[in-house]
Image (cartoon, rainbow, N blue to C red):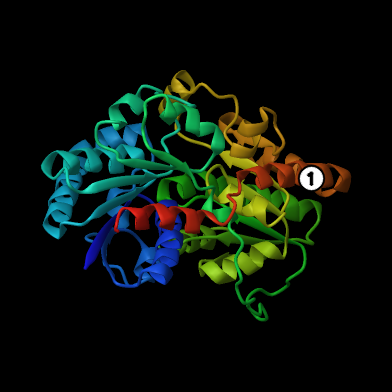
Amino acid sequence: MKKIFILTGEPSGDKLAAKVISRLKQDKPDIEYMCVGGSNLGSLGIKSIFDLKEITYIAFTDVLINIFKIKKKIQKTVDEIIKFNPDILFSVDSPDFSLRVSKLVKIKNPKIKTIHFIAPKVWAWREGRVKKMKKFIDHILLLFKFEKKYFDEEDILNTFVGHPLLDNENESSIKLENLINNKKNIISIFAGSREKEIANHAPILFKFIKKMNEKEKIYNFVFHSTETNKNYLLYLLKRENISNVEIIFDEKIKKEILKKSIFAVVKSGTVSLEVCKLNIPSIIIYKMNLINYFLAKSFLKIKYANMINIINNKEIIPELLQNECNDEEIFKAVYYLLKKPELIEKQLSEIKSTINELKSSTSSSEEASKVLLSYLS
């Protein structure tokens, strides 16, 4: 029986990996799996060798603080992969963790094929990583067409597959009765998938909600959480005196809530594409500690944080980052756009044309599973 080890480092990678593996299971059900993953891969019946939270470190300073823990986890992961002896090591995102593991696995067992999904953002910083990857990555799957030239230059096998979050899906809708008190004027909020992101963003967002309520108490706010973080968010919310806030963590319910939303406030990252796909107007927020911020500013070669803005080289979706990520600026941006339907229409129109360019001819999951299958024949 063929074997695949799936390697993820954070909830968003777990979600993307699960979409690909779910598609692969349809084409070839007789594959044995093991993983470092979370609830999404777990829902497919795939055992994780440890809890994903144990390796989800948010930024540079966290890596420094936890360097010895990380090294131990990397070594344990390598040992477990070698013991499992898969045909393919399928790593998804989290390059600082997953590529270190892939490199060590390739040294110990060159026969294991290493396929990495979501190329490191070499166009944003550390372009020299491509040369190093050539030594231990057999194939890389690309989300965006413009990334191809970076890997072609180094003769690394690569395939544009598009983004899984943009795949067309036929899902049965879920009835939302009794899930929230008032289903009108929903504003979806994504504070982050990691505890430190939530700690940074949630207090600001609660203040923003209070400002909205002072202006017009006609909106309902829904925080989209992971099951892992729901209790932490609930703990933070209990300290606030806000009645029109709900926390949702079930993936299917979250999607239905988002579809019915009139607006979204979104932490910078992968989830913003899902919001764009569902044609929901939004703004982007992100705040980190000052050390990480200045390090990022010194390394990054790009002007924008959001992929839609990066591709278009202009701010289609407003970005409120660092100092601008405060309750007053978020309130002003959201309230202004809500009262300017022509600006929302313009945003959604530009997003739609960009999204169409990011889709593959079939679906990302199908294209990625084809590449995996080609290494199993």
Q: Which residue is mark 1?
A: 349
Quadrant in which residue 86 is drawn: bottom left
Is 356 placed above or below 2 here? above
> In this orientation, which residue lies closer to the viewer: 154 or 188?
154
In the image: residue 344, left or right of residue 208: right
Quadrant position of the N terminus in the picture: bottom left
Quadrant in which residue 171 is drawn: bottom right
Q: The disc labelled 1 sits on which kind of residue?
A: Ser
Q: Is residue 122 visible?
A: no
Residue at (80%, 51%) from the top-left corner? Answer: 215
In the image, residue 302 lies at what x, y percent? 55, 24
- How many numbered dots are placed on residues in this image? 1
In the image: residue 316, left or right of residue 37: right
Residue occupying the far top of the picture: 298
In the image, residue 244 lies at what x, y percent? 67, 65
In the image, residue 31 lies at what x, y percent? 28, 68
In the image, residue 28 lies at what x, y percent? 36, 69
> In this orientation, which residue lies closer to the viewer: 272 or 100?
100
Q: Is residue 260 visible?
A: yes
Quadrant position of the C terminus in the picture: bottom left
Query: Crowdedness of circle 1 by 10 Å Cα count: few (<14), some, many (20+)?
Result: few
Q: Secondary structure at mark 1?
A: helix
Residue at (86%, 48%) from the top-left corner? Answer: 341
Residue at (30%, 40%) from the top-left corner? Answer: 138
> In this orientation, which residue lies closer to the viewer: 136 or 305?
136
Residue at (58%, 71%) from the top-left corner? Answer: 253
